[in-house]
Image (cartoon, rainbow, N blue to C red):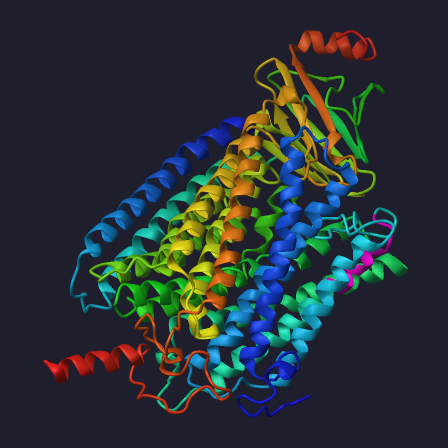
Amino acid sequence: MSTIAVPGAGVQRATLASTDHKRIAASAGVLSLGFFIAGGVLALIMRTQLAADGGVVSQGVYDQLFTMHGSTMIYLFVVPISLAVGLYLVPLQVGAAELVAPRVALAGLVLFACGGITMWSGFLTSGGAAAASWWGFDPLSDASHSPGSGMELWIFGVLLVTVGQLLWAGCVLLTALRRRAPGMTLMRMPVFTWTMVATCLLTLFAFPALIVALALLWAQRHFGGVLVGDLGAVDYQQLFWFYGHPVVYVMFFPFVGMVGEVLATFSSKRFFGYSAFIVAVLAFSGLSMTVWAHHMFTIGQVTNKYFALTSTALVVPAGIEYFDFLATVWRGRLRFTCAFLFAIAFVLQFLVGGLTGVILASPPLNYDLNMSYFIVGHFHYTIFAGSAFGLFAGVYYWFGKVTGALLREGLGKLHLGLMVLGTNMTFFPMFILGAQGMTRRIAAYPPSMGWQGLNELETAGAFLIALSVLVFLINVVVSLRRRRPAGDDPWQGHTLEWATSSPPPRYNFAALPAIRSYAPLLDLRESREAVAS
Amino acid sequence: MPDTHHAFEHVKAVYLPIAIVVFTLVVGAVLILLVRGAGRDRPGRRSNALRLELANAAVLACVAAFLVVITFRTETPLDRTVAHPALRVRVIAAQWSWRFEYPGGVAVAAVSTWHPRPALVPTGVEIEFAGVSRDVIHGFWVPQLSFMRQLLPGHVSRFDLIFHAPGTYMGTCSVFCGEQHTEMHFALQAVPAVQFERWLASGGSSA
């Protein structure tokens, strides 16, 4: 393993074993995007099934499809890519030469790859892949109701990737706390870095609960007697959702940070309300550790009102973030780049997910809508219409920094248009179907229910999303083949990653500018303008 | 009196308009900001407004408090069970069937079907359902009543429901429970009390 690579030497050979945080992050990012495409293919098969009168796959296969779709998108795509972007950017944004404990981060990459392969290898077993949903709820996931090695491979796959993610979160958090450049105080850290700090704190507090839940599940399958008593099934849910709600914010905060950076840069303005935003993100994180049992309102075994109160209270920090987003754009000199437009789409579409979340936080409404397609629509608006758009805003923004070549704006706008159309066609009808009584995770429905038309619309939307992703992939290939050099700072960015070459050298910076605020490069430009005038 | 559907409509009538207004306001604000920002030469310099932030947070907190009060007031009677219901029905869910057991040994079963034989219930009175699962977690969901409750293995969940209008109420398993989850439905047919008593007395045969 070449731990100290000389810049420019042995580049290809060292890629997979490199301890350069940028290489580790790039590998993790590419791997996550691969799983995104794989999980998307599963979704297309499901959508085809639901439009074609249930005639494409059997119920048992359908169960494997949605289990692996959800598991892939959460454990193998959104969570790892959230942390991967942090692995890449946090050292650069705080002016560090390296990540803390890069070998640990490399171990995290290996665990992620092994875990993903382990989980997906379930498809090769005679019983097929796991089919007990991405929750793996006991007793459905126990040895008698889910026999076979698909479920075992799922447990070990999720365990491995989760341990890997914990390692990454530790590395990123410690880098932000311990490796900041001179002058980079905590309250001068960029917005994205702060959202990664919150993300890593949530990861470190919540993910161990999943590891415990999976270990108990494994022991229950092999020895029994673990999740027992008349509420043993509830015990698993408590542990699972103690992970399962904070993970929603792990899949959200990094994209809030990316969108914040993108809006500020393309409004040519300092990010608005920095201190209030940081306080809101930290309050959001704390509060989000107290809301997990709103997933359990319909069990009748938790204090619904407490969890309704904490869940509804989330509108306060969320509203502060929205205020700061809009105020950043206010009086800005706007540049309508792909990154900026994806960020605007994030702001508008995530709002639908957020507002339906407030609705679901009310038990009298949740008693009806929980487990229906309404909830499927809700979380796809947060994770896909929200986070995935935030991710693409980040991709169009930082692609030039990572590769040295800019993505094509024209293809990017085609990608955006198709994806906005496809997303809303796919996920908005779900609210209506849920209110009409369509249950999630069903493989078919009789024509007499009257759900066919909206399901066909959703399926058409899903294929539009697939087409938009294809346009994105073409954009990547074209942009890398016929390179339009990005230069150090193609967008007039505000943060330190734009003060070095694209891609940055092994140790990130030849020299650092003075750091006097959370937007050091904007400071520099403003003082130059002041001198010039 | 836990009229679950009325409770749902009552809370929805508050939440949904607020959600639509907030969405419209934000979309409108974004559009205005985009249009006005498109041709601007020099960006503004202001980057914080503490008083506005605090005012925003205060408004949000008031809205949240208002929503929570509405929710709490509506939820309290929903979660209550009366001491002396007019009827007690046992609900037994299993992979993949429903079974409704009445006093006097009458039982109605529905096994893996979208077209189950209805179990009868009397209209206008409080009925206590005592639900349990024989194997994995199932969900007792009646969309027309806007109510669901998870049924756990080995633990009896009790809840009261009232069927105000006569008619057939379709029910479905809402918690994924394995291979034939798709097919796991039941039907409750609400009829006047007299007709219900006749049905029960006949051993559940004359509907």
Q: Relative to A452, does residue A170 appear above or below in the rendering? A: below
Of A512 and A311, the residue lying toward us: A512
Q: Is residue A363 visible?
A: no
Q: Residue at x 28, y 66 (%)?
A: A272
Q: Relative to A127, does residue A92 appear above or below in the rendering? A: below
Of A107 and A294, the residue lying toward us: A107
Q: Main secondary structure of the magenta part?
A: helix
Q: Is residue A153 magenta?
A: yes
Q: Relative to A262, does residue A387 appear above or below in the rendering? A: above
Q: Which residues are magenta?
A: A146-157
Q: Is residue A278 magenta?
A: no
Report the quarter where the N terminus of chain B lies.
Answer: top right
Q: Relative to A25, does residue B5 appear above or below in the rendering? A: above
Q: Quadrant of residue B142?
A: top right
Q: Position of residue A184 (x, y in %)?
A: 37, 85
Q: Position of residue A175 (x, y in %)?
A: 51, 83
So how many labels did they put on this image?
Answer: 0
Of B84 and A73, the residue lying toward us: A73
Identity of the residue furthest to the right in this view: A223
Q: Is residue A203 visible?
A: yes
Q: Is residue A493 left or right of residue A353?
A: left
Q: Residue at x 67, y 57 (%)?
A: A240
Q: Quadrant of residue A498?
A: bottom left
Q: Position of residue A47 (x, y in %)?
A: 62, 39
Q: Is residue A494 left or right of residue A124?
A: left
Report the quarter where the C terminus of chain B lies.
Answer: top right
Identity of the residue furthest to the front in this view: A482
Q: Position of residue A3 (x, y in %)?
A: 63, 90
